[in-house]
Image (spheres, grey):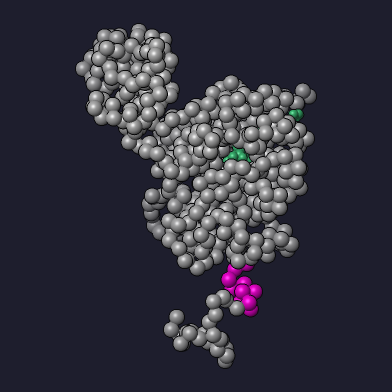
Amino acid sequence: MSDTQTNGYHKNGDKRQKIGSEIDQETLNSGAEGFTAEKIFVNNPSCMGMTYDDLIVMPGHIAFPVGDVDISSNLTRNIRLQVPFVSSPMDTVTEHQMAITMALQGGIGIIHSNMTAEEQAQEVLKVKKFKNGFILDPMCLSPDATLGEVLKRKADLNFSSFPVTDTGKMGGRLIGIISNRDSAFIEDPNVKVTEFMTARDSLVVAKDGVSLEEANQILKESKKGKLPVVNDNDELVALIARTDLQKNKDNPRASKDSHNKQLLCGAAIGTRPDDKKRAQLLADAGVNVIVVDSSQGDSIYQIEMIKHLKAAHPQVDVIGGNVVTPSQAHHLIEAGADGLRVGMGIGSICTTQEVCAVGRAQASAVYHVAKYARKFGIPITADGGIQSTGHITKALCLGAGCVMMGSMLAGTDEAPGEYFYQDGVRLKRYRGMGSIEAMNAGGEKRYVWDTAQSHVKVAQGVSGAVTDKGTLRRYIPYLMQGVRHGLQDAGIPSVEASRDRLYNGALRFEIRSPAAQREGGVHGLHSYQKRLY
Ligand SMILES: NC(=O)C1=CN([C@@H]2O[C@H](COP(=O)(O)OP(=O)(O)OC[C@H]3O[C@@H](n4cnc5c(N)ncnc54)[C@H](O)[C@@H]3O)[C@@H](O)[C@H]2O)C=CC1
Ligand SMILES: O=c1[nH]c(=O)c2[nH+]cn([C@@H]3O[C@H](COP(=O)(O)O)[C@@H](O)[C@H]3O)c2[nH]1
Ligand SMILES: [K+]
């Protein structure tokens, strides 16, 4: 500072220039402050598609604490989220547990459609009926289950208490409960649970309709770990766990319906005639947003589906996609889409660009589609290719309302599937919805439906695994805080402000050379440890 600045004056050749509140136009135009997105993406002389890693955001002036950065943003015309994160409609990413936790954390989950329409509607219903602290589908045992079964379930499921009902299912008459203490000293695996459970007469229960506070009080007084909730017929309607009460404190960011306070939930459908019935069941279950899920959304099939959905279910928002160009976006907006999903062939498990030769680099796709859709008030979701909090920040800075993630979320406790070990590393399976494995599990019809001439399956995705990330309850706050730091460094107090600056040219970027990209990563170390938080 000292050799360029004297008494508030910069040396500028021979002349001395007084420091004003803004940088002078000449410096700004020189590229010294980076470049506008317009300069980088429009009339792009290199004709090159760019993605998140190609770009870097220029720092701005920080005039606010990181905790003040507001990351709330719109998913669709009518749905605003406190946290702009969406989980992908994939069978290794989003079922009810993911959707519930995403919504509790302020984002939203989109339930995949690789199951029957009835099953998918049930998944949506579980999200809509979720009540903080209440387990609505506890694993139950029947009276003739044995200790052996209890031990096996304990090992498989990682929890240790099971209600015993006459039907062996939720909704059956409550007969007793098995807890760790009950089974601890029994050795014969063939002993029936009825012989060592805590029987109904000695159980403390709550009546259906109990509030969480009341339940909390009962648990405190009874000093028990679990509280079954029963209806007037003594049938089990819920289970409350002390540990859940502790970790499920009300989340002020949660994404909820304004009228009934239920969690928000999305679901995906395809563009086949049968999908209209599926949409009806989803709407009946209370779904808030339907994602019409195609890799190439600009088709007569999707346009027809969007028009149908808007006419048949006006209360449900519709996200069309996927698209990567303004002309594709135009057709879906014209059909009535309330939001767009952007990204083609850029997901971690995608082979579309390789197999079909069609798609687009993601930063270019996000910038161009967001800018176009904005003219109609339609937010876009940047779908796929997100590998870090930095990528999320870049997507938002390029005009995305929200980001959709698959691989980032597939390794969390809340994703479907069990962890397994490979080479000593704890992993979960993650696969593309166009992979042979996912097609065989239910999505196949999409690929062979209209190919009476040929029965060849063409995979557009791979099947693999991702590392264990622990619970979303810790991971989402880490992602949020990372994004807040990014926006703060760029001098941007909110997602909304980033949009204004993107389009008025105040937000600046630079393209990174391959060497600059290497420099931006960890380098030159013999070894290192990377802990996220
Ligand atoms: N975002 C991406 O880059 C990609 C995503 N995926 C995912 O894989 C899954 C499958 O995607 P798609 O292959 O695009 O499935 P899709 O069902 O939309 O399309 C598959 C084929 O069926 C045809 N089709 C669809 N509806 C039709 C109708 N009503 N009548 C006649 N033909 C019809 C399509 O034109 C296409 O040839 C989705 O979950 C998608 O998100 C797959 C590839 C790329
Ligand atoms: O080319 C593809 N073949 C597939 O089999 C496939 N499955 C999912 N998707 C898309 O990838 C997104 C998730 O990507 P990430 O793991 O990078 O977050 C998802 O949100 C989808 O848009 C696929 N794309
Ligand atoms: K890819």
Does residue 144 sit above or below 267 in this rendering?
Answer: above
Which residue sits at x=68%, y=65%? 39
Q: Is residue 217 above or below residue 377?
A: above
Does residue 96 appear left or right of residue 156 in this picture? right
Residue 339: give x, y in percent of width and height: 65, 43
Q: Is residue 26 magenta?
A: yes
For residue 437, above or below residue 408: above
Residue 347, x across and y down, in percent:
59, 43
Left or right, 99 with respect to 505, comes to left
Which residue is rendered at x = 51% and y = 38% of the image? Answer: 256
Which residue extends farthest left? 185
Asked if residue 259 lies left or right of residue 304, the reply is left
Q: Which image quadrant: the N terminus?
A: bottom left
Count how many numbered circles sit on residues in the image. 0
Q: Is residue 353 above or below residue 364?
A: above
Q: In the image, residue 304 lies at what x, y percent?
A: 76, 33
Q: Position of residue 30 (x, y in %)?
A: 63, 75
Q: Say whether residue 286 is visible.
A: yes
The reply to whether residue 102 is in sight is: no
Camera-side residue: 207 or 119?
Answer: 207
* Residue span colored magenta: 25-35
The image quarter containing residue 90 is: top right
Task: Tell whether position 249 is magenta.
Answer: no
Q: Residue 108 or 259: which is nearer the viewer?
A: 259
**51 on left or right of 127:** right
The quarter of the rendering in which ligand 1 is drawn is top right
Residue lying furthest bottom in this view? 14
- The residue positioned 37% from the left and 23% from the top of the image is 239
Which residue: 72% across, 25% down? 273
